[in-house]
Image (cartoon, rainbow, N blue to C red):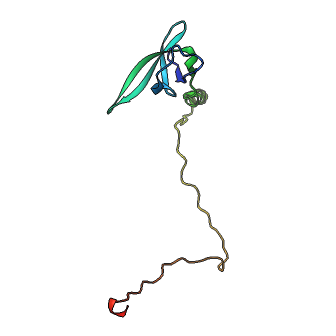
């Protein structure tokens, strides 16, 4: 209960199969029975998101990997904070976006450089045509 699961219908088992709308969706387990699991999935209806609760057989469900990187980051941050607390330091565990890449100079042959410019517009009056 509380795990993230992916709903993927297995065609070799027809019983307990989810509706085609839920195929490929990720949800959270809210109930477990002997042969099925209850999964809570969000569904967009009009301009709102509804939380739909469906029961699907175990054959049509697999554990999702959507949360792995988050859980790994949480463990690493906890370890960093525990180590910093022992030494009495403060550590920043926020994710920092990569900044702009450094600039670089490109050396080129002056003969190989072509300057592109538009062709000059010449107005020709109707009388001269």
Residue for point 53% across, 13% down: 15
Residue at 66% across / 80% down in the picture? Answer: 111
Q: Residue furthest bottom?
A: 128
Query: Which of 65 and 58 lies nearest the eye of the viewer?
Result: 58
Quarter of the image containing the C terminus? bottom left
Q: For the point 57% across and 33% down, which residue is it? A: 89
Residue 115 against residue 70 in the figure, above or below: below
Residue 107: quadrant of the picture = bottom right
Q: Position of residue 53 (x, y in %)?
A: 42, 17
Q: Nearer the viewer, residue 83 or 7?
A: 7
Give coordinates of residue 25: x percent, y percent.
49, 27
x, y (%) of residue 56? 50, 16
Q: Relative to 18, is 65 on the left or the right?
A: right
Looking at the image, is 112 positioned above or below residue 77? Answer: below
Where residue 121 sits, quadrant-wise, is bottom left
For residue 65, what is the image quadrant? top right
> Which residue appears at 59% of the width and 61% of the height?
103
| 97, 110: nearer the viewer | 110
Q: Nearer the viewer, residue 1 or 119?
A: 119
Give the x, y percent position of residue 47.
32, 33
- Residue furthest top in the image: 34
């Amino acid at each position: 209960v509380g795990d993230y699961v992916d709903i993927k219908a297995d065609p070799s088992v027809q019983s307990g199969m989810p509706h085609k709308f839920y195929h490929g969706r990720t949800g959270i387990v809210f109930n477990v029975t002997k042969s099925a699991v209850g999964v809570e999935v969000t569904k967009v209806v009009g301009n709102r998101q509804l939380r739909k609760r469906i029961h699907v057989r175990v054959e049509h469900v697999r554990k999702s990997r959507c949360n792995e990187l988050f859980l790994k980051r949480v463990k690493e941050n906890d370890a960093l904070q525990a180590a910093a607390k022992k030494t009495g330091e403060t550590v920043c565990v926020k994710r920092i976006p990569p900044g702009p890449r450094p600039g670089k100079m490109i050396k080129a042959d002056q003969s190989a450089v072509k300057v592109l410019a538009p062709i000059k517009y010449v107005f020709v009056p109707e009388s001269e045509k």
